[in-house]
Image: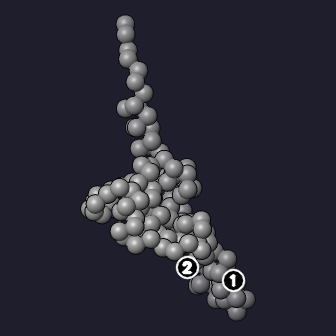
Amino acid sequence: MTNLNEALKQIDDNKAKYFRYKFPDLRFDQSTELKTEDDFLKSVNRKSMNGFYRWEKTDEYKALSILYMNTKMTQDYEKIYKVVSEQAVTGDEKAIKLFISLQKDIQSNVKVAASILNTKTVEEETEDDDLSLEV
């Protein structure tokens, strides 16, 4: 699983809402006004952001952040491609090599993020399967 929206569906709903609050460009409706911190806290029925700030230090949050960066990279790819293409026409091979290198680094981080999120999902399913072994 390497899709950010799929990953956000796999986590606690309030954490997913926080992630979208923190990164407002993930909102589908860009025409609506951004929420204030107080509005957000009311929408998730919390009194403080402390739990979310602690969550930001977890592997799950870091994995989602990597997927977010990959999403941003995908959105920016067209702009970057245009610049690299223009530089390639002038013979700037260094710019092309740098772009390819960065792309490979981000892709390898996406694989790590996906494995972290997939492992968590398997662990949760194992804990909550309500099966009992009888011999």
Q: Is residue 101 positioned above or below 59 on the image? A: below
Q: Left or right: 51 with respect to 111? A: left
Residue 105 visible in the current orientation: no
Q: Left or right: 129 with respect to 1? A: left
Residue nearest the viewer, comparing 120 with 9: 9
Disc 2 designates what residue?
Answer: 98
Disc 1 designates what residue?
Answer: 82
Residue 75 in percent (x, y) is at 61, 72
Q: Is residue 14 positioned above or below 92 on the image? A: above
Q: Residues within 10 Å of mark 2 (few under 14, many from 20)?
A: few
**In the orientation shown, which residue stands out farthest toward the top?**
135
Element on which disc 1 rests: helix
Pointer 1 and pointer 2: residues touching (CB < 8 Å)?
A: no
Q: Residue at x 44, y 62 (%)?
A: 19
The type of colouring in the image is one colour
Quadrant that contains the C terminus? top left
Q: Left or right: 132 with respect to 103? A: left
